[in-house]
Amino acid sequence: MSTPLIEICNASKTFFGIKALDDVSLALPAGHLLGLIGQNGAGKSTLMNILGGVVQPDHGGHMSLQASPMPRATRPMPPRAASRSSTRSLTCSPT
């Protein structure tokens, strides 16, 4: 298997005592189109927000870009900036 374009390992995140992510790992290969689907509350937005640096994982969440470690953000985004970077969207593309 080739080196993933982006990878996150063992990310966990809890909000107000509720686990949004529990030891999640993901490796995205280069050159592929992928979708992340799941039920409401499954942690999709939380995972994307961790990948985007909007929120920090409680545990784990070591990320790499083309096998090079990615440093964590030194401080969380201000709430207004985080709300503008929401990953929840619906887009349709012509085939």
Image: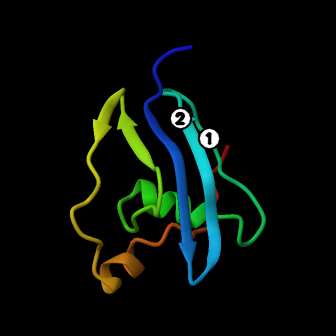
Q: Quadrant of the C terminus?
A: top right
To which quarter of the image does residue 75 belong?
A: bottom left
Q: Is residue 88 visible?
A: yes
Q: Which residue is mark 1?
A: 34
State left or right for residue 81 relative to residue 74. Answer: right
Q: Nearer the viewer, residue 65 or 94?
A: 65
Helix, strand or loop at disc 1? loop
Helix, strand or loop at disc 2? strand
- What label sits on residue 72 in the rendered view? none
Q: Nearer the viewer, mark 1 or mark 2?
A: 2
- What label sits on residue 28 in the rendered view? 2
State left or right for residue 34 relative to residue 31. Answer: right
- Please state the horizontal and vertical placement of residue 17, each as a whole percent of the image: 61, 80
Residue visible at 57% across and 40% down? 26
State left or right for residue 33 relative to residue 84. Answer: right
Q: Amino acid type of disc 2?
A: Leu
The residue lying furthest to the right in this view is: 39
> For the residue carrying disc 1, how many other residues have a C-alpha within 10 Å: few (<14), some (14-19), or many (20+)?
few
Q: Nearer the viewer, residue 71 or 87?
A: 71
Q: Separation of disc 1 and disc 2 at Cα?
A: 8 Å
> For the residue carrying disc 2, how many other residues have a C-alpha within 10 Å: few (<14), some (14-19), or many (20+)?
some
Colour option used: rainbow
Marked residue nearer the N-terminal end (1 or 2): 2
Residue visible at 61% across and 49% down? 24
Marks 1 and 2 in Cβ contact (< 8 Å)? yes
Q: Quadrant of the N terminus?
A: top right
- Please state the horizontal and vertical placement of residue 11, each as a whole percent of the image: 52, 52
